[in-house]
Amino acid sequence: MAEKNTSYDASDIQVLEGLEPVRLRPGMYIGGTDEKAWHHLPVEIMDNSIDEAVAGFAKRITVNLIDAKTIEITDDGRGIPVDEHPKYPGKSALEVILTTLHSGGKFNNNVYKTSGGLHGVGSAVVNALSSNMDVTISRDGYQWHQTFSRGKTTSPITRGDATKNHGTKIRFTIDDEIFGENAAFKPVKIYRMARAKSFLSRGIKIDWICNPELLTDDMNIPATTTFYYPNGVSDFLAEKTDSKPRILPRMFSGSIDFPDDSGRVEWALTFLTDENGAASDDGFFASYCNTIATIDGGTHESGFKSAITRGIKAYGEKTNNKAASTIVSEDVFDSVAAIVSVFYKTPQFLGQTKEKLSNPEIARYVENALRDPWEMFLASDPKTSNALLSFIINLANARIKTKQVKDIARKTPTKRIRMPAKLADCTKHGVEGTELFIVEGESAGGTAKQARDRATQAIMPLRGKVLNVLSNSDERFSANRELNDLIDIIGAGTAKDWNDDKLRYEKIIVMTDADVDGSHIASLLMAFFYQYMPQLIYGGHLYLSCPPLYKLTCGTESFYIDSDEELEKLQNGKYKNKRVEISRFKGLGEMMPNQLKETTMSPKTRRLIRIDLPPKTDDGAEDTEKTRTIVTELMGKKPEFRFKFITEHAQFVKDLFV
């Protein structure tokens, strides 16, 4: 065994300078090194141009996709300052901004009232993750030029020709050392990003230019075009929905400032139907903050939905339609096409890539801003509003009836029990194809509920370690609510009164963390099922999930790893001396819902272990008895049996977790 280094002094403390932290841990700044990550880089640069436009200093932006790895973004704003920075003698403000984290004009509300690039890391991060960056500034009567590579300057700032123009032009090439040789921009993604920035910044023209060699016929996008939406989100929503059946003859849209000049909200909303007047599947709800797409929603979405839902219910009360009281937000937004965009001085996002807005006050601001305009909109056209109200009430009635039918279908024929509140049941009628996931803790339960297929997958979270039924009395088991809840949820009874016809799920899946505690909980649950529901095992209904321990990313490759042995093998083999990013999953609750779905819950991509027992036949009777003896000894009250088993099998243990 190698001798441990017990010394620990100042020489062991590593200090990362400049932009080294970004290159060492890019996932902390842009969420990873995959396709989504490198497509985020032009967004960071473009957000700075959009901020200039929103602040009133720019009117035109150009996005030029030069080749598969290089993009150039230009604006006619004021231009990044090029004079010497007072805190960094000998360095221009341009160099400071592009080589220093947390630098920029976004921290001063006198410079930008609202900003998408708030954290002061965007441009510097792009520089750090680019093999080359070429910057041209037009301001103060001249053109200024400077080059960078991988976060460092490669030339001093130089003054060029005289010019009356003003603005910033940044060209950069994504770094193969970070993203891999196969990393390439997808024109469709950049095109859509530029279009979205345009309709979110009303009145701003964005020119799109793409190298024709990068385009294919199936992309269905032009090589050059100009995006221009003078009325912002309402123009874009009209473009998306004018050819589709709608309930409202005119769109509900507008823009209102927040109190104290802290920001504003812009919105557009309509209700889509199919050709038969039923709810349409073409609806969508998109939200943004400071032109950043908040794909995970946030408080602005909550405020918007609350205002629209309360408004339609209030209209129902005014028209004495008692059925309006049954309406919930789900009914109202079942077939809407809507966009809500807020601009705010001090937004708070979850994550550097800003996918969820978390300011609690914005929910109140948005709801208050929309309340009166929405009520006036409904009152201005009673005929249309009554039709809309009837349409939404029909959706509410359908929801209620469907829920009642499904609630009845999920219950056993003879035992009309009330299911535990923690159970998130599936909605499918019958047993075939249904699955019950028993998960460890509320955090994992919350993630699993987001990752599941609601139609076929039910989630039941447990609290901590479950009771060891083989080392406790029947009285303690009878008093244990969680295990008795499981018996009720599964529905088929226990060993003595088992009835296959009452089984509520085809698969019972134990899904615990990939660590020692998770394995312990899984073993306790298996002991419970073995003792009280052996028919579940004999029938092939009981399974263990196989969540991964790690995620390994190398360039464009990204995959999951199940064990330390597999990780070590890859690190010493295929990926030796390569730049890899390794994420360790500490628990199911710390995984993103899409990761949990892909690795552990989706039948298309997951792996399950089916729990088997020897068959209950005359030939297998001896094996069955042997199994019962082993289970009883290992899980029973006498620790000496467990100690004996551990000592006899210690030679097979490679790693011991203490």
Image (tube, helix red, strand yellow):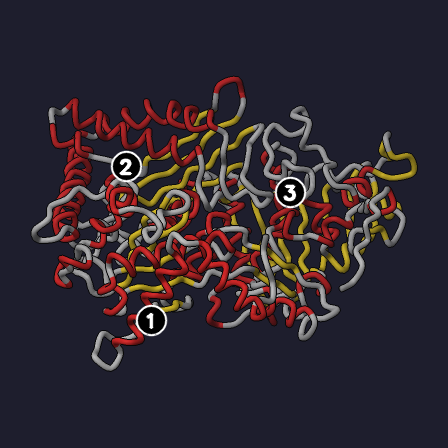
Give me the residue at 87% from left, 48% from top.
160
Where 598 sits versus 13, above or below? below
Location of mark 3 (residue) = 49
Numbered disc in front, either 3 or 1: 1
Q: Is residue 274 above or below residue 179?
A: above
Q: Which residue is mark 1?
A: 626
The amino acid type found where label 3 is placed reads: Ser
Where does the image place residue 112, in percent across and percent down from the top left?
64, 30
- Mark 2 and mark 1 lie on one chain; the one further toward the N terminus is 2
Taking depth in this image into account, of 129 and 77 the one nearest to the observer is: 129
Residue 655 rendering spot, x and y as whole percentages = 60, 63
- Measuring 65% from the left and 65% from the top, which residue is drawn there? 555
Q: As drawn, is 124 to the left or to the right of 42?
A: right
Q: Quadrant of the N terminus?
A: bottom right
Mark 3 falls on what kind of element? helix
Residue 346: x and y in percent read 58, 28
Furthest toward the right, the residue is 90
The residue type indicated by label 2 comes to Ser
Residue 138: mark = none
Taking the image as shown, residue 387 lies to the left or right of residue 111, namely: left
At label 1, counting other C-alpha atoms closer than 10 Å, the crowd grade (few under 14, some 14-19, many 20 or more) is few
Going by the image, does 591 lie left or right of 380? right
User: Going 71% across and 32% down the picture, which residue do you hit?
Assistant: 105
Q: Nearer the viewer, residue 403 or 108?
A: 403
Q: Which residue is at a point 48% across and 43% down the rendered structure image?
A: 294
Q: Nearer the viewer, mark 2 or mark 1?
A: 1
Does residue 518 sit above or below 567 in this rendering?
A: above
* Residue placed under numbered mark 2 in the picture: 329
Q: CA distance from mark 2 to mark 3?
A: 36 Å
Q: Quadrant of residue 626?
A: bottom left
Quadrant location of residue 576?
A: bottom right
The crowd level at tag 3 (other Cα within 10 Å; few <14, some 14-19, many 20+) is many
